[in-house]
């Protein structure tokens, strides 16, 4: 199966990461020759991939969001296995740090959150195959291409995946601002850890919440009592990373 | 000037905050009767505002994003003055905490970030009138209605506003991961503070950066070297709030 990635960062990072087979770069006629476009052309030529100039309206048809004049036809997203993620942590001699998405569906939010996961060096991400977002071109775009480097496992059942992580001594932490949640900056996030972020509006499914070892929440003092899911998840990921660095 | 807000949280919080004059609630026929919809109808009746049932396609015409079957015709967003924001901090006997948006244009990002600002009790937000996002219905929606409570000042020139804040002894901190930036969690964010967040991709304008008292950045260890602007700004706002609470 082929996909068409779009947007400058998405295309550049996909070529740079080199995990997919690229087939064709498309540049809109008259696209501004920025550094990034120059790098894209260079990497495409190095990989023996053709660079086609095309009318802008051909790119306009690809998707709703800004393609910025650049697209890449490529092989499908290379999903990993859960074991690959744990093996990566082990090979770096680090305590595993994973992000689990429980039915998060908005590509913009998923992409923003995965971008943060890549930035803090998370070893991987787990998403459920059904009723949750996959790593679509929209997610790649929203992540500014970061998911091209991240190991992402797509599983049939997130609850089973949690069970497997616990069998590997990973602590599973649900993000939810409920009464028995610990404050995120007071919880110990230094060990092997999987952070579970729920969907906008619904939060975690009960079955998922019950399997968590503990819950963390963000304090809030305003009138509106929830944060954007990507923002909340990112804040906890950064706190986990900060604690780990202080711990070293 | 009238506006049409859409989305359950946006409409509910606008009615609850009570800072705008509401004219008419529109509910799509067959809309699911959630708690929120019930509260909207209750608040509308209390305010003497008519609740009109309408065909869903009439709401579909309002905008591209999900209206969730609910819209509200209302007066324009009630902008505040910079002095109102400083007066609010003073009336609470708190060190001012402000968020300044430098040419941030994406409504989704702006809304997510303003939602965080409201959650941490920021006293207000400053945006430039031109070349930056205003508080449009899309921003209200993306903020889950939080901006209905926030004081937001729209200024002609952000650089001048920075000057006025400095004259009031507010420290102006730019968010930018450059070499001479302090790590956000090592910087002292407890005093009177205005955090400036730049646009996606471009960051801060040079003129703005030069007026900042200091810069803070987020450490990153991945291959992709930037975060979503709403995520990065939110992480620093939470750190500022955490430090303030620890300081009390």
Image: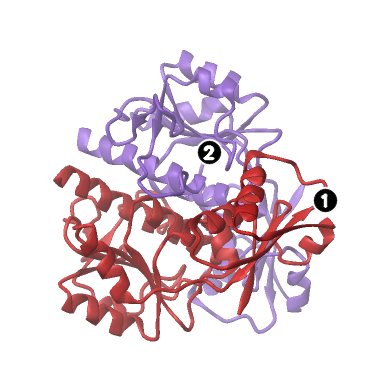
Chain colours: A red, B purple
The mark lying in front, picked from 2 and 1, is: 1
- Looking at the image, which is closer to me, A77 or A141? A77
Q: Are marks 2 and 1 on the same chain?
A: no
Helix, strand or loop at label 1? It is loop
Horizontal and vertical percent for residue B104?
60, 40
Q: Which mark is residue A68?
A: none
Q: Relative to A196, say whether B17 is above or below.
A: above
Helix, strand or loop at label 2? It is loop
- Quarter that holds the C terminus of chain A: top left
Horizontal and vertical percent for residue A66?
70, 55
Q: CA distance from mark 2 to mark 1?
A: 44 Å
Question: Is residue B52 left or right of B117 when viewed as pictured?
Answer: right
Residue that badge 2 annotates: B151
For residue B21, say whether it is visible: no
Q: Which mark is residue A29?
A: 1
Write the residue at 52% across / 23% down.
Answer: B209
Write the residue at 60% across / 18% down.
Answer: B160
Could you tell me which chain the residue with mark 1 belongs to? Answer: A
- Quarter that holds the N terminus of chain A: bottom right
Horizontal and vertical percent for residue B156?
68, 26
For residue A123, say whether it is visible: yes
Badge 1: few (under 14), some or many (20 or more) residues near its Cα, within 10 Å? some
Residue farthest along the top direction in this orientation:
B167
Badge 2: few (under 14), some or many (20 or more) residues near its Cα, within 10 Å? many
Horizontal and vertical percent for residue B6?
65, 63
- Tally of marks: 2
Write the residue at 53% across / 67% down.
Answer: A20
- Quarter-of-image position of residue A155: bottom left
């Amino acid at each position: 199966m082929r996909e068409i990635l779009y947007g400058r960062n998405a295309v550049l990072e996909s070529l740079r990461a080199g995990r997919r087979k690229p087939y064709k770069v498309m540049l809109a006629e008259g696209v501004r020759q920025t550094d990034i476009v120059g790098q894209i052309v260079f990497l495409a030529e190095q990989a023996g991939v053709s660079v086609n100039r095309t009318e802008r309206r051909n790119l306009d048809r690809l998707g709703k969001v800004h393609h910025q004049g650049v697209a890449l036809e490529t092989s499908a997203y290379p999903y990993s296995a859960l074991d690959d993620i744990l093996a990566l942590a082990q090979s770096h001699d680090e305590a595993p740090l994973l992000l689990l998405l429980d039915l998060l569906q908005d590509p913009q939010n998923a992409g923003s959150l995965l971008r943060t996961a890549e930035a803090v060096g998370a070893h991987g991400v787990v998403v459920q195959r059904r009723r949750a977002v996959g790593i679509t071109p929209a997610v790649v775009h929203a992540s500014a291409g970061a998911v091209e480097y991240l190991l992402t496992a797509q599983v049939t059942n997130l609850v089973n995946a949690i069970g497997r992580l616990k069998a590997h001594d990973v602590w599973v932490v649900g993000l939810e601002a409920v009464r028995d949640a610990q404050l995120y900056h007071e919880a110990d996030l230094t060990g092997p850890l999987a952070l579970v972020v729920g969907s906008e509006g619904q939060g975690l499914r009960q079955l998922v919440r019950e399997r968590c070892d503990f819950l963390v929440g963000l304090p809030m003092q305003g009138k509106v009592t929830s944060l954007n899911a990507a923002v909340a998840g990112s804040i906890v990921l950064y706190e986990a990373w900060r604690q780990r660095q202080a711990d070293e």
